[in-house]
């Protein structure tokens, strides 16, 4: 017995220029505010420290990346103040 299936309906006609522009303006990823580009930083830690930190972040309900970013922001401000930047 052969299986049958329905195909998705095809759009009726070409969308207007306004409809296409509206789609582009609200397309995937457009629901987020514009953010600054990011850079990746790699840090070598002892495995035991990494596990402790990860577990502590989970218990506190924090994302590790957000917590590290917060620390780097505070530390950068301290260093800038120290050198008079």
Image (cartoon, rainbow, N blue to C red):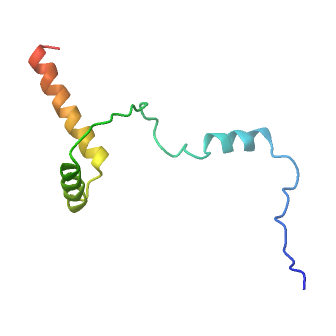
Q: In the image shown, does 9 or 43 lie closer to the viewer?
A: 43
The answer to whether residue 7 is left or right of residue 47 is right
Q: Position of residue 71 (x, y in %)?
A: 20, 38
Q: Residue at x 23, y 55 (%)?
A: 51
Q: Position of residue 25 (x, y in %)?
A: 62, 40
Residue in front for this viewpoint, 70 or 42: 42
Where is residue 69 shown, x and y percent of the image?
27, 38
Nearer the observer, 60 or 43: 43
**What residue appears at the point 24 percent right and 45 percent down from the top-left corner?**
67
Which residue sits at x=88%, y=50%? 13
Q: Which residue is at 23% across, 50% downward?
A: 47
Q: Nearer the viewer, residue 66 or 52?
A: 52
Q: Is 72 on the left-hand or right-hand side of 82? A: right
Q: Residue furthest bottom?
A: 1
Asked which quadrant contains residue 56, the reply is: bottom left
Quadrant in the picture for residue 10: bottom right
How far across and down, in percent of the image, does residue 42 sit? 32, 36
């Amino acid at each position: 017995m052969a299986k049958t299936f329905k195909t998705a309906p095809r759009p009726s006609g070409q969308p207007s220029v306004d409809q296409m522009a509206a789609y582009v303006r609200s397309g995937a990823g457009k629901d987020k505010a514009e953010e600054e580009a990011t850079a990746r930083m790699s840090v070598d830690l002892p495995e035991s420290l990494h596990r402790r930190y990860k577990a502590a972040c989970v218990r506190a309900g924090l994302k590790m990346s957000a917590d590290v970013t917060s620390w780097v922001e505070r530390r950068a401000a301290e260093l800038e103040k120290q050198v008079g930047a």
